[in-house]
Image: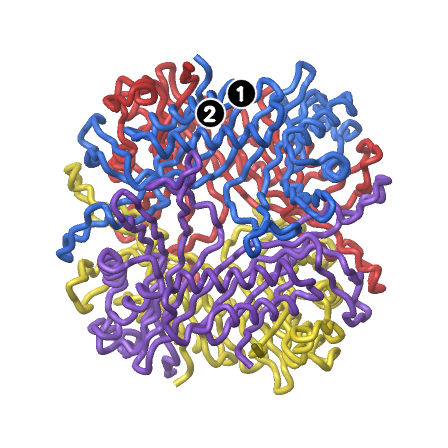
Chain colours: A yellow, B purple, C red, D blue
Amino acid sequence: MNAKLLGHRYGKSLVRVLKVLRDGPTHTIKELTVAVSLEGDFESSYTSGDNSKVVATDTMKNTVNALAKEHLGLENERFAMLLARHFTSKYPQVQRATVEATERVWERMQIAGKAHPHSFSQAQQARPFTRVSVDAVGANIESGIKDLLVLKSTGSGFEGFPRCEFTTLSETQERIFATSLTATWTYLADPPDYVASNAAILSAMLRLFAENYSPSVQTTLFEMGGAALVACAEISRIQLAMPNKHCLRIDLAPFGIENHNELFVPTDEPHGLIEATIGRG
Amino acid sequence: MNAKLLGHRYGKSLVRVLKVLRDGPTHTIKELTVAVSLEGDFESSYTSGDNSKVVATDTMKNTVNALAKEHLGLENERFAMLLARHFTSKYPQVQRATVEATERVWERMQIAGKAHPHSFSQAQQARPFTRVSVDAVGANIESGIKDLLVLKSTGSGFEGFPRCEFTTLSETQERIFATSLTATWTYLADPPDYVASNAAILSAMLRLFAENYSPSVQTTLFEMGGAALVACAEISRIQLAMPNKHCLRIDLAPFGIENHNELFVPTDEPHGLIEATIGRG
Amino acid sequence: MNAKLLGHRYGKSLVRVLKVLRDGPTHTIKELTVAVSLEGDFESSYTSGDNSKVVATDTMKNTVNALAKEHLGLENERFAMLLARHFTSKYPQVQRATVEATERVWERMQIAGKAHPHSFSQAQQARPFTRVSVDAVGANIESGIKDLLVLKSTGSGFEGFPRCEFTTLSETQERIFATSLTATWTYLADPPDYVASNAAILSAMLRLFAENYSPSVQTTLFEMGGAALVACAEISRIQLAMPNKHCLRIDLAPFGIENHNELFVPTDEPHGLIEATIGRG
Amino acid sequence: MNAKLLGHRYGKSLVRVLKVLRDGPTHTIKELTVAVSLEGDFESSYTSGDNSKVVATDTMKNTVNALAKEHLGLENERFAMLLARHFTSKYPQVQRATVEATERVWERMQIAGKAHPHSFSQAQQARPFTRVSVDAVGANIESGIKDLLVLKSTGSGFEGFPRCEFTTLSETQERIFATSLTATWTYLADPPDYVASNAAILSAMLRLFAENYSPSVQTTLFEMGGAALVACAEISRIQLAMPNKHCLRIDLAPFGIENHNELFVPTDEPHGLIEATIGRG
């Protein structure tokens, strides 16, 4: 039999670095988990045991470290871009390099009402990330956030959906809307400051989530995407995934207790999942 | 600003079912975690708060349950196909339905040397899965396995790779090769028995892994893919992902102890990751 | 052979409730995961298949729900106490009831600079908890926090430790100190407000962590425990567990780069673990 | 305020080693995750910043490695004992050393019907472990297994339990019994072969689980503990924890389908939890 290689890529994942950025006695912590992935002229490593073009994944890890020491600053996108360009420019066999950097955010502690210069807590479980892909044509820059848990305790309903023999769900104008938001937006141009742009996008989406009545996850998702596009001129599109973390009203009638949408059981399984990409009209 | 919907899909994830298949007093356990995802004419639910076409994700869950009771048997692929076809045939607004079913395997216990009729252990952590997508054109059937941990303690090396200023890795003809295999193969035609075909594919790949010297993860991956294609005539291609779960030789020289490839530290971070798709030549 | 029951307890774990506390249009979210455990006269259920005294764990779940609807407020300790007392007072066979409630904290969103009345984010990954045990003698009330990640980027060292043939660690006056703090404190008396007392204890510990030079995890742990005891007169003791989440300086010398404590690799495995209980002298 | 140290211990956790045991070309893999914990005369490290008695946790890790290279064999208990004794005999300040070793089991692959000499799969998710504690008085040796998932699809019921206003559970003589068994047994004397004894204990418990009708988790737990004590004369007691992994019958009546205990939803939350210790009568 003849086997044929239809596609391939390889790299190093879970390369962790933590850098202390110093401005005199005031430190800032930047912790990233980096993944590097290369595509290109590597077919012979699969088909004939020839490693002569295979940049070792251990070398990739060393490269992340060396370049992080020299160049990692506040904007993850600029570091990811520099790293991706290193691989495409240094090795002719590399046709595309993709770098994904996911941040664990360390916030400065407030001690006795003042910002402390070198103490931090990793309060936030949501993870900002960027993914930069570079090839001969140019670069693709995406940024986003993973797993941001948000909830609104009113201002959400779901009505007017079709019913069939397998439908048991009641219509409602009053439910809890909880989701673990993951959003990815695409930059067409460098903004003046990626940190500020990312924050503006997130803030615009959360305002929409909080303030608008939600007739469905779909509608809220679309409105949030639209708000993100308004908030930042440099992005061309945004992809949103919103799992519906159902909070089910607990039936207390067997115990003679009325439950006026006060007590719920939060569930992880099963969950709805709504995904869409929104661009400029 | 005008926002435009560029793409969208929605569904229900993590729908768990466990079915007892009975053959007289002999039971078999089939436990699946199912995800349903629909694409189609749902734009109005995003842009105008119109839910009149939105099959509720709760209805999807009920449908999984009802059809599992009636139709789930030993072959996950046939159940996923039936479920996907239910959605495309019943609702005109559905243009594509995708069903993914991941199995937790319950093996029959051996008690006093005999197979017990109704007692089981969930020994295996690897998860077989199938993903079936149905649209107006036809069906796409993929099956595979996730996270199968395998290791060979000799018969693996890595030599002849390029060196640059960031390269510190030594060449070796003797290393541990450990990986957590994820493989996805595509069926072009129904085999007589999906369970038997999936087992034959897996068995052929493991034989290759065990018996052939590995000059690189890439080469072994390609050979395993080729073996899978030989083992089952009904599949057209296979996609393999092999993270390199590095086992690093521990340096005991500071304690005056030689370590002849006997003692290693298994690590999860960072890890190499090799991915390729192999088709028929 | 005669088997004898030496000890036993049983209960229900992972009972999740989410309650919307309403003050007009302003909501507050309280989400708890509750575990109930009972000890008492249940021996016959083990030794003779007699369930006549076994409060079903499903009944425990229902009881958590019913009492949460009626009584759950801002202070977890008061709810856990009420729940534990319910079991000891209602069922004569129960000699001790233990209730543990772990909170997922939902923080109110700031939208356009103002606190939003019904939108929240679950930003914090650390989990406050309380554990209340009630028996004929009285009650034991513990509160605490699990997995609070904190880091100081200077002001920490480790010197003067003994060296043997297996010692390779260098002495240092400058290292990163990162830990995932878990603390449990014991209340001897009801404070006016558990929420305020818990916050004061945590705040006092973090101030110590930030401000004092750390010659060892042990010393800092002891000082933090002492600060907690000063901060709250109603607690008698505090137990602290501080895994040392090592951030290892990356050696960049092979690449001709000096690393003056700027770049580190954060590691999860292995980690030091320091645990102690501190009381009043 | 005077703070007082009431108790303390410290050590190193998650020290991972993988050893290749060679018998000519036939290899065996032993992978352990080791935790070392020391108690003793360490008070000054907490109260006066004096590290002169503090065996560095990095030294503990090195010691695990060096002694694993020299002494780790098939029986985890003998290695844990040797390691614990090393710490109590070498350092006078150590009054008690506790070593816990948890195994990830690598099973030999069967290739073309034959056992392969150097290829393995980590099929089993349950984890065998041992915990050895040594002090001036002697040694305490516990062994066991964590998280062994087992299920019986018939032969289990729950009847005759008390009912109160919060009871909604129905009585049944036919339910699924699924649990994730964790068991810890205490050796009073060295058996000829720990591997064989551990296997015999486990096998005896599973036979009981499979063959006896279960009127309650409690009864089955007690019978399994009794069977373990019969199976191995060297153990004095066994502690069992059996979370009840509820499989709930799905109500399909709304869809006109009868569900005769065929289809269930497996749930993780909430779950019952039964724990007991059984000794010789």
Q: Position of residue C4 (x, y in %)?
A: 41, 15
Callout 2: few (<14), some (14-19), or many (20+) C-alpha neighbours within 10 Å?
Answer: many
One can see residue B19 in this view:
yes
The residue singled out by tag 2 in the image is: D228
Mark 2 residue element: helix
What separation in Å lies between label 2 and label 1 (alpha carbons)?
Answer: 9 Å
Mark 1 residue element: strand
What amino acid does circle 2 point to? Ala
Quadrant housing the N terminus of chain B: bottom left
Q: Seen in the image, is D57 located left or right of residue B187?
A: right
What amino acid does circle 1 point to? Ile
CB-based contact (under 8 Å), mark 2 and mark 1: yes
Q: Position of residue A74 (x, y in %)?
A: 64, 65
The mark nearer the N terminus, 2 or 1, is 2
Q: What label does residue A183 carry, if any?
A: none
Quadrant housing the C terminus of chain B: bottom right
The residue singled out by tag 1 in the image is: D235
